[in-house]
Image (cartoon, rainbow, N blue to C red):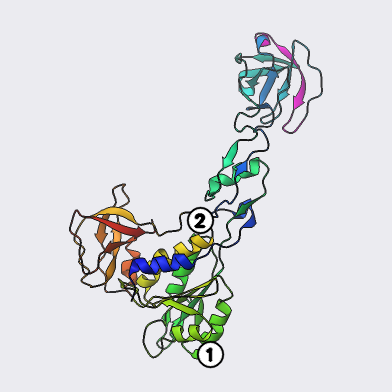
Amino acid sequence: MITFEEAIETVLRNAKPLPAAQVRIEDAVGRVLLEELRSGIDMPPFDKSAVDGYAIRSAEADRPLRNVGLILAGDVFKGKVLPGQCVKIMTGAPVPPWADGVVMVEDSSEKDGFVTFLKAPGKGENICRRGEDIKKGTRILARGTVLSLSHIAVMAAIGRSRVKAGTLPQVSLINTGGELIPPGQSLRGNSIYNSNGPMLSALLKSDGIKAEPVIVRDEPRALKAAFAKGLKADIMLISGGVSMGDFDLVPGTLKSLGVKCLFHKVRVRPGKPMFFGVKGRKLVFGIPGNPLANFMAYLAYVRPAIRKLACRPDYAPEFKTGTCSGKFEPKTPRRALVLTAVGAETAYSLAEVSNNGSADILALAAANGFTMVKEGGSLKKGEKAKFLTWL
């Protein structure tokens, strides 16, 4: 049986980054940028009006000026504008070279083709100068940036429709157990609803991956067929059937398909019977069927593997530090990850969420983290501790 830290290290050592891909910028959120982006243009690419109003020579704002034209966004004004004249201009339209100010329409009054100005603009007022936001050659985003929603507009603004980015792995999600039925159907006999499947599917979705849970009976042929299909993905995630009971057939079935077991037991609670194996570059996770074990295993093993395959630099599980608001006494010789309510304040207060074991779904709903307690140890009120969270 290996330690919790050894299990994480083994997973990450075997998670090899996938080849980069050219990705549409709309689909790039959550991916890591694998090129440096520099602007090939000035932004804005020309002097443009910041408002709807009139382009004028600012020295002439003290007298009525004849309006001799209109400049719309995207237009090129080719007319000649003499002293004593002005042109109406819309927001975003190019400011003619002779104009050194734009008067807002609210500060003007037009009658019979002549415009009177209520307020004189200063030189350059209401004009966005060429290159004011971004100069040609400026680095926009560094290689290794994890792309967020706020990055999409700037990539589009410099003319990029695609970027070189990390590839999100394909994941197959399998729940084992003849008693499981999808939520929404009517319970029959001794069936129960599949809670782990939707939970894992939602966790995967939070990492940008779409995977619908497949329910498979604990029967050798059915398992083998499902696993053979699941191994076509980069990661196969199996919930249930990995312990030592008569119907825990997952490890043996995986072995028959050529999956090499790298570990099967971890000195941790919850999640002791955790299975991890590989077939070539494919990663296979077998998680014990209890919901707490599923949730913890995703945070500690699966998410880090997904991120490393996707070339993200922040792939390691992120253990934050908080302060215990009460005692933690898990009473186990194994490393314990105790279900916790984490206070959202900067200092992070940690309070144990009492539960009836690894199958207590209601307790999981009241928590937002797992506090780590050393083997056979405990934590006192006021003591600092590491925790995993999905805040």
Residue 201 seen in this snapshot: yes
Q: Which is in the foreground here, disc 1 or disc 2?
A: 2
Q: Residue flagged by tag 2: what amino acid is it?
A: Arg
For residue 40, side relative to residue 381 (left or right) = right
Query: Circle 1 — which element?
Result: helix
Q: Residue flagged by tag 1: what amino acid is it?
A: Arg
Q: Quadrant of residue 363?
A: bottom left
Q: Which residues are magenta?
A: 60-75
Looking at the image, is 241 positioned above or below residue 140? below
In the displayed orientation, state which residue is furthest to the right.
79
Within 10 Å of disc 2 (Cα), the crowding (few <14, some 14-19, many 20+) is many
Residue 265 in the magenta stretch? The answer is: no
Residue 63 in the magenta stretch? The answer is: yes
Looking at the image, is 59 positioned above or below residue 187? above
Q: How far across and how far down the image is residue 183, in percent?
A: 46, 75
Q: Quadrant of residue 99?
A: top right
Residue visible at 66% across and 27% down? 130
Q: How far across and how far down the image is residue 365, in percent?
A: 35, 65
**Going from the N terminus, do you reach mark 1 or mark 2 first?**
1
Residue visible at 60% across and 42% down? 154
For the residue pair 92 and 154, the one nearer the viewer reads as 154
Query: Circle 2 — which element?
Result: loop
Q: Which residue is mark 2?
A: 312
Q: CA distance from mark 1 to mark 2?
A: 37 Å
Q: Which residue is mark 1?
A: 221
Q: How far across and how far down the image is residue 227, in percent?
A: 53, 81
